[in-house]
Amino acid sequence: MKLAALATVAVSVGTAFPAVGLGQGFPVTIAHEFGETTIAAAAERVVSVGMHEQDFLYALGIAPVGVHEWWGDYPYATWPWAEAARKAAGATPEVLKGFEINIEWVAAQHPDLIVATYYGDLDEATYRLLSAIAPTITAPRGFPQWGAPWQDELRLLGQATGRSARAEEIIAGIDAGFAAARAAFPGLEGKQAAVGYFDNGLVRTYNSADTSHRFLASLGLTIPKLYDEKAAERGHFDISPENLNLIELDAFVWPEGMAGISELSVYRTTRLHREGRDISLGGGVLSGALSFQTPPALGYLIDTLPPMLAAAVDGDPATAVPPPAQ
């Protein structure tokens, strides 16, 4: 059963967004973290300089003329979960490579709207340079860098492009997908889980506002309150091998796999590992979707990750966690 069937219907842009009335609702003034931006008319040439906004635009039925690649090296900087939406939107964007925003590249795309709703390293000087090219909107107000919920980001982009009704349809569909997953896997409800990475001898994990942790919470799982306390200053914190009791949860997800930590005897003796509660995504497409947290990525995650989590939280090593679909 495809748990995200309802979400997929809402996220799909297989039928074109109606051309009639696209200019309605303009001019519109958008409030965002760098102030307010007035957009006089529906944009015809949208450029995304954030790291994942192309997925949101495709879902809204918009074909950006330029996008910024985060990682993955896929054509048009579009991962597999969003490829159908890209094609349906008719998008063949130019791609900006590298993490930094290239102002000259942006100007060369002749945008009439620039979106930077997911670029936490944006500074005031760069924002002013972008705004001199075209109206520019940045992240929703009131959230930490890189930490705005996908719903708020989608609503902001829907408002800026005159497609707020479409944004609400997408949100309703994804909410239905989460509800279906919770009904199908009731064993997830109330169990503790988290996401983390092992690097340079330390485990790095995050507070409950982390987008991956918000995804787990949407499935009924809970993030330990202690994580919010330890990550209060930076949004994340590091765990040394002698403190691995902090990840002794009902499930723990390793997006980049368990290379390195699985070789440590102190990890192999944890309840987490002995009872098969750890989930290795191996750094593939599913791992990418967990980082992107965009409407098309969420549909893919809802279909794929809940069965893996359910196998992990049951605490029975004989229940093998299914391998991630790639």
Image: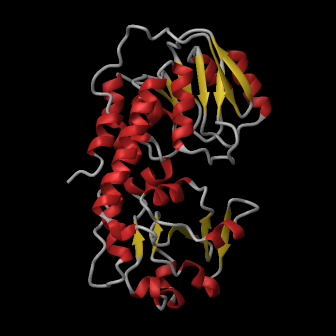
- The answer to whether any part of residue 48 appears in the image is yes
Q: Which residue is nearer to you in this view: 171 or 104?
A: 171
Side (left or right) of 245 relative to 238: left
Side (left or right) of 55 relative to 231: left
- The answer to whether any part of residue 97 appears in the image is no
Side (left or right) of 162 relative to 233: left
Q: Quadrant of residue 110?
A: top right
Could you say where residue 106 lies in the image, as x and y percent from the top left? 61, 23
Side (left or right) of 254 relative to 18: right
Q: Quadrant of residue 296?
A: top left
The residue depicted at 47 percent of the width and 64 percent of the height is: 256
| Residue extending furthest toward the left | 1
Tally of numbered tags: 0
Which quadrant of the figure contains the N terminus?
bottom left
The residue depicted at 55 percent of the width and 23 percent of the height is: 159
Could you say where residue 176 lies in the image, as x and y percent from the top left? 35, 45
The residue depicted at 46 percent of the width and 88 percent of the height is: 271
Could you say where residue 204 lies in the image, as x and y percent from the top left? 61, 68
Asked if residue 261 is positioned above or below residue 120 in the image, the reply reads below
Q: Which residue is nearer to you in this view: 4 or 118?
A: 4
Could you say where residue 326 lies in the image, as x and y percent from the top left? 31, 55
Q: What colour-coding does the image apply?
A: secondary structure
The residue depicted at 61 percent of the width and 77 percent of the height is: 201
Asked if residue 127 is positioned above or below residue 80 in the image, the reply reads above
Asked if residue 2 is positioned above or below residue 281 in the image, the reply reads above
Q: Quadrant of residue 251?
A: bottom left
